[in-house]
Image (cartoon, grey):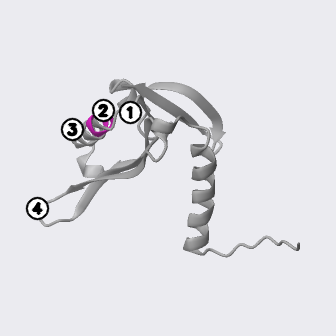
Amino acid sequence: MTLHITKEHIKTEENQIHHKLYEFNASHFPEDLRGRYEEMKLFLKDAEGNVKGGLLGEFCWNWLEIHTLILDENLRGTGYGSKLLNEAEQLAREKHCDFIKLDTLSFQALDFYKKHGYSVYGTLDNVGRDFSHYYMKKDL
């Protein structure tokens, strides 16, 4: 058999890779947790339907993983980030998640997440030479 490595970006092949990993992982999880995967997308929109922020993540087995939480800069500190996070946490509880995990950089939202009960379980220093990367978790 001859194999080769390619740098092509073909979405269907990317999905095949994700599916292979999902199937492998699922084979190691208890039966009642298998098949528990769902993307979660929350959007903050103005009256005209323009996106002003949002929270993107995925429910995976017994947790919610938050990948992105962002607000337009002029909306930061107004409570909308907390509202998005609270909505995500409520959805995680409804989906019977045991915890939520996320990551943030030192110049992003470390204190915001701490204020909401998230704790750091891992840190990478020297990220971009001057920053730290924090891995955080909140038990539900």
Lower position in the chain sequence, tag 2 or tag 4: 4
Measuring from the top left, give residue 119's x and y in whole percent. Answer: 46, 24
Distance Cα–Cα, label 1 vs label 4: 32 Å
Q: The residue under label 1 is which amino acid type?
A: Cys
- Which residue is label 2 attached to? 93
Residue 90, above or below 38:
above
In front: 11, or 121?
11
Q: Is mark 2 on a helix, strand or loop?
A: helix
Amino acid type at circle 3 is: Gly
Q: Nearer the viewer, mark 2 or mark 3?
A: 2
Q: Which quadrant is the C terminus positioned in?
A: top left
> Are circles 2 and 1 on residues that touch, CB within 8 Å?
yes
Please say whether residue 30 is visible from this viewpoint. Answer: yes
Q: Which of marks 1 and 3 is nearer the N terminus?
A: 3
Q: Which amino acid does label 4 sit on?
A: Ala
- State whether the magenta stretch is mostly helix, strand or loop: helix
Q: Give the range drawn in magenta.
A: 89-93
Residue 97 shows which numbered tag? 1
- Horizontal and vertical percent position of residue 45: 20, 58
Marking on residue 79:
3
What secondary structure is found at the residue carrying circle 4? Answer: loop
